[in-house]
Amino acid sequence: MNGFDFTLNGADLAALPSGALWWAAERLLAVSDLHLGKSERLARRGGTMLPPYEVRDTLARLEADIAATRPAAVLCLGDTFDDLTAMENLPEQEALWLTRLMAGRRWIWIEGNHDPGPTSFGGTHLAELRLPPLTFRHIAAPGAAAEVSGHYHPKARLGGLSRPCFLIDAARVILPAYGTYTGGLRSDDAALCALMDDRAIAVLTGKAAHAIPMPRAQIRPRASTSPR
């Protein structure tokens, strides 16, 4: 699957090129920030008009990951829907597609800031999931350990090209946004630098997962104020 294998608190995980996280021992596939229905939500609120294909594109990639890993459980790590109205307004074909993907496996929805309430699709809705030795939540908690989260849509630049990425250190992994049209936050943003330790890596998504040292903001030396 051209993923990047790593260990977090004794759990052997794989960062997949698609942006999904695979935990083989638990047969668990985790994805974050699909933001299904973003184009509908923007149109409803009079914002930028986007081509209405993002739901189908995101579900097609999720279907491919499910086919490749054959998970017993799928964990949606928050902001699966762009808001709760977007969830209710999913076109019938897309809603049926999502329902088919859920069939025959455990499906867990972690609440996000965009979709704080239970979904109408069934499954299990939780504020967070503790599955030893890991804890899954939408937004990283400062000082937490053995944590898997999303929310920030991290991106990193390599060779002039910016890609969604996983951020990984000894305490946590932050997943990239899985959905189409989701945008992102550069890894050198102060919020991400404050969460990740100095040895953190960024695993870029794409045709294959590619690990690099996490890009951080360059600290400029202060100009000298001593007399000449």
Image (cartoon, helix red, strand yellow):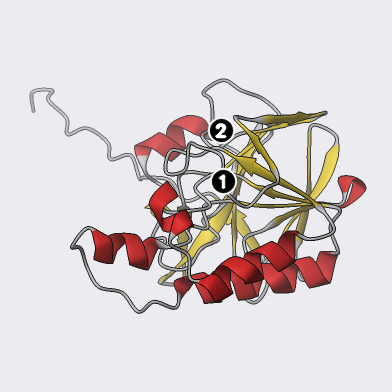
Give the total number of marks visible in the rendering.
2
Tell me the residue that label 1 is attached to.
119
Residue 23 shows up from this direction:
no
Front residue of 28 and 133: 28
Please report the residue visible at 47 percent of the width from the left and 55 percent of the height from the top. 87
Between the residue at mark 1 and the residue at mark 2, the CA separation in whole angstroms equals 35 Å
x, y percentage for residue 169?
Answer: 64, 38
User: Residue 11 falls in which quadrant of the image?
Assistant: top right
Q: Nearer the viewer, mark 1 or mark 2?
A: 1
29 in relation to 114, above or below: below
Q: Position of residue 198 (x, y in %)?
A: 55, 35
Q: Indicate left or right for 166 with 38 as reference.
A: right
Q: Quadrant of the C terminus?
A: top left
Residue displayed at 48% across by 61% down: 36
Question: 65 and 42: which one is in front?
Answer: 42
Give the residue type that dot 2 points to: Asp
Q: Could you tell me the amino acid type at mark 1?
A: Thr
Q: Secondary structure at mark 1?
A: loop
Disc 2: which residue: 197
Q: Are marks 1 and 2 in contact (CB under 8 Å)?
A: no
Indicate the quadrant containing the N terminus: top left, top right, bottom left or bottom right: bottom right
